[in-house]
Amino acid sequence: MRFLLEDWRPKRRAFLRECNPWYQSTQGFFNFIYIESVVVRNILPIALIIGALAGLFVGGYLNVINVPVMEWAISLEEAAALESGDVASSGIEISLAVQRVGLVVGLIILGVFFGAIFTGIYHLIRRATPGWNMWSWAIMAGVLGFWAVSLIVQIRYPLNPPGVGEESSLLMRQAFQFLFVVISLVSVCGVCLGLKFINESDSNGIQRFARYLSVIIIYLAVVVVVAFAFPSNPDPTPDWMPPELVILFRTFSLSGHLLMWIVISLGVVGYLKYKEYGIKSRYTTASDI
């Protein structure tokens, strides 16, 4: 009886595939879901780990070039407070060493967050442009992630050095920044889905170009509307703060974000290629043959 069942099951599946279109479509759908889940499941832990390493690397980088700018801002703030007679303590003072460690820890957490975002965008880009290779997918995912999470937010809500900003408006600024990042990410994901729809359609020539252009125009319209709908930073720069200090701080901070996205994008694909081709860290010897 077991022999008969084992012999009939593959024939039954073959019969259903040939005669039942619904069976074919559902099987294809579940196979597609399985393949996509495997891809995400394989890339996500790699991206999270490399994101954490990228945060550690960028933390050291910013400790070297940006912390001196922060110390400069703090010294100017203290001098301005002494000059104005406002020397009241604002709370528990944190040592510079603890601040440096806290910067690294915060960037490690941010790197893990960037790694998760990279995985999602990479997945959408891979589905939208199946003819590309892994390097192209990773570079495009890194560019879109840097634009959506770092650059456009820095343009609208730039990072400020110590001494710029009131504690009373801190929560409001952070809430608007977070909401702006969410809307920016959703818009970028919408662009990826629009490209997938266009590439899978039977349009070509002028019609395909018009669809590409419409996706870009809709995205730019959303960006402009959101940028003008959100309130600007309410905290003005104090008169005693040199403009070059603010520019240095913002430039170095943004360069750290850019470096983190570069490390994540190239690191994830580099590791996947390393595992794919079995690249060895030493030369092959006679004992390996």
Image: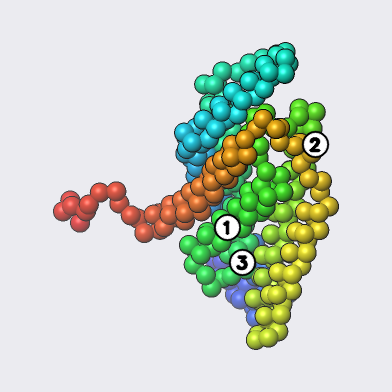
Question: Which corner quadrant holds the C terminus?
Answer: bottom left
User: In the image shown, does 10 or 244 lie closer to the viewer?
Assistant: 244
In the picture of the structure, the residue carrying the numbered disc 3 is: 127
Left or right: residue 287 compared with residue 174: left
Q: Which mark is residue 143?
A: 1
At label 3, the amino acid type is: Arg
Residue 202 higher or lower than 180, as above or below: below
Q: Which residue is mark 2?
A: 172
Image quadrant where one finds the N terminus: bottom right
Q: Earlier in the sequence, mark 1 or mark 3?
A: 3
Q: Label 2: few (<14), some or many (≥20) within 10 Å? A: few
Along the line of sight, the residue nearer the viewer: 153 or 270: 153
Kindly state the secondary structure of the residue where label 3 is placed: helix
Quadrant in the rendering for residue 186: bottom right
Q: Is residue 149 above or below residue 199?
A: above
Q: How much space separates mark 2 and mark 1, taking CA atoms?
A: 28 Å
Which residue type carries mark 2? Met
Residue 141 in the image, given as x and y percentages of width and height: 58, 58
Q: Amino acid at mark 1?
A: Val
- Of pointers 2 and 1, the one earlier in the residue sequence: 1
